[in-house]
Every structure is written in C-alpha cells, then in structure tokens.
Amino acid sequence: MNTEAIKELLYKMADDLLVIGHRNSEWTGLGPILEEDIAFSSMAQDKIGHSQALFQILHQLGEPEPDTNAFMREAKQFHNAQFLELQNDDYDFSTIRHFLFDHADQLRFDNLANSSYEPLAKVARKIKGELKYHVFHADIWLNKLGNGNEESHARMQTALNNAWNYALGMFEKGDYEEQLIADNIFEGEQSLQNRWLAVITPIIEKANLKIPAEKDWEPVLGARKGYHTENLDQLVTEMSEVFRIEPGVEW
C-alpha cells in the first residue's frame, strides 16, 4: 500500500474533525436552549476524540505524536475543508453545517469500516456507531427549523444557500485518489459525494428546503492543499494557545 496516499487521507479527515470539533465547542454556554448547549458540547468532544484516533494512526506511520501534530502546525499546513473553519456567526449556519458535514462524515466512516487498511477500518467501525446520534440530532433540527415559522424557514434556506458550495469542497479529490480506490482503501470522493446527495436530498425536501440549482454549484476547493481563509489562522491560534505555552505539560 502507498503510505503517502494513506497519510493524505488521514490528514484531511483528522483536520476536518479537529477543526469542526473546536468550532462546535464554541456553542458551549451559548446554545439556544440548555439541551442544545449540552448536545453541541458533547458532539464537539466526540469529534475531537475521533480526530485524536486518526492522528494516532498517523503517528504509527511516522508522523508527530497526536498533540504535537494537532497543535504545533501553522494554518497553511492544515488539510481541512474551508467549510469547517468558517465562523459560526449564527445558529442557522451552524445547524446547516452540522447536517451537511455529519452526513458526509457518517457515510465516509461507513465506507472505511470495510477498508483494506485495517488500522483505519478498525477505528471506522467504532466511530461510525457514535455518528448515528450526530446525524439523528442534525436531522431533527433541520426539520424543526425548516418547517418552523416563516422566519426560521427563511433563515435556514439562506444558510443552506450560503453553505452549499463550501460543503461541496468537502469532496475535493487528493493527489492519490486513484491509488486509494485501486487499493480498496477508500471509495473515492466522487462516489462519496454521490451517496451523500442521495441521502440528504429527501431529508432537505422534507424540511421544506431546496438545494441550490446545480448550475450554481461552484465547489470551494484548495483547502486540502493548504489554501485557507483567515478564519483558520484565528482558530489555530486559539486552540493551540495553551499547548504552545508549555508543550508536553501534564495536568
């Protein structure tokens, strides 16, 4: 197996989870209701834990140990999709991002549970079960707000429109795409995107929302190769502040 191909896949997944985990954690203490405050905090903790498991596999492949890898890189060295680094702004956008990402994440781990690369398959089999709750939560809130009152519906539709092209960037192909497919490590981003669309479309329609017209689809690409927004610079500074002050400290 091509080790570099596996590393590329692991890095983009680990960084996606690390970044969205920290973004979701920003709702701690600020959720619209107490249960949501707890739910977003719990899911944020799960995602950071999932990223740690992937960073551990990278460490076994010769990369830095997980905490160093997560907190000592510069923003330009991250491989997460831009969609996940964008500021929360409001709960509508965060809910839409939660829905779009978590469905993609669940489908990705479902596929990887059968990966020919056993260390990743083993982790995927554990994680995919935990993601059922995340997806269930996202579906409930998409439907509740999409079918709420006139204002909630309008805000959710606007958030979906604004998020869509960023969300398509989650499926940006890597340099080793064909190798990963040939080695039965991962199904490939186009296949994953097709499955994602098939799953989310009826759920979105049930929530009385509409996916933007396909003629307007312009995926935001480049983040997998280090091209990010200024939002990530700020986030990396915040989430690595304590570790950079005293690397390796034991609390």
Image (spheres, helix red, strand yellow):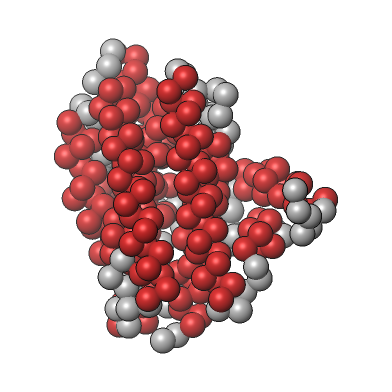
State the image quarter where residue 122 is shown: bottom left
Where in the figure is residue 127, as x and y percent of width and height? 38, 55
Residue sitting at the far bottom: 1
Looking at the rendering, which quadrant does residue 225 occupy? Answer: bottom right
Whether residue 37 can be seen here:
yes
Image quarter where the N terminus lies is: bottom left
Q: Residue furthest front?
A: 251
Instruction: Point out residue 13 in the picture as x, y percentages from the top left corner.
Output: 46, 60
Q: Is residue 1 above or below residue 117?
A: below
- Please report the residue visible at 28 percent of the width from the left and 30 percent of the height from the top: 140
116 lies above or below 80: below
Name the side, left or right, on which 86 lies relative to 193. Answer: right
At x 44%, y 31%, the residue is 39
Q: Is residue 52 left or right of 195 when viewed as pictured?
A: right
Residue nearest the viewer, comparing 178 with 123:
123
- At 32% from the left and 52% from the top, the residue drawn is 129
- Badge count: 0
Measured along the vertical axis of the image, is residue 181 above or below residue 210? below
Q: Horizontal placement of 54 versus 155: left or right?
A: right
- Against 46, residue 42 (above or below) is above
> In percent of the image, x 70 and y 43: which residue is there?
238
Q: Can residue 84 be seen in this view?
A: no
Residue 40, image x and y in percent? 47, 33
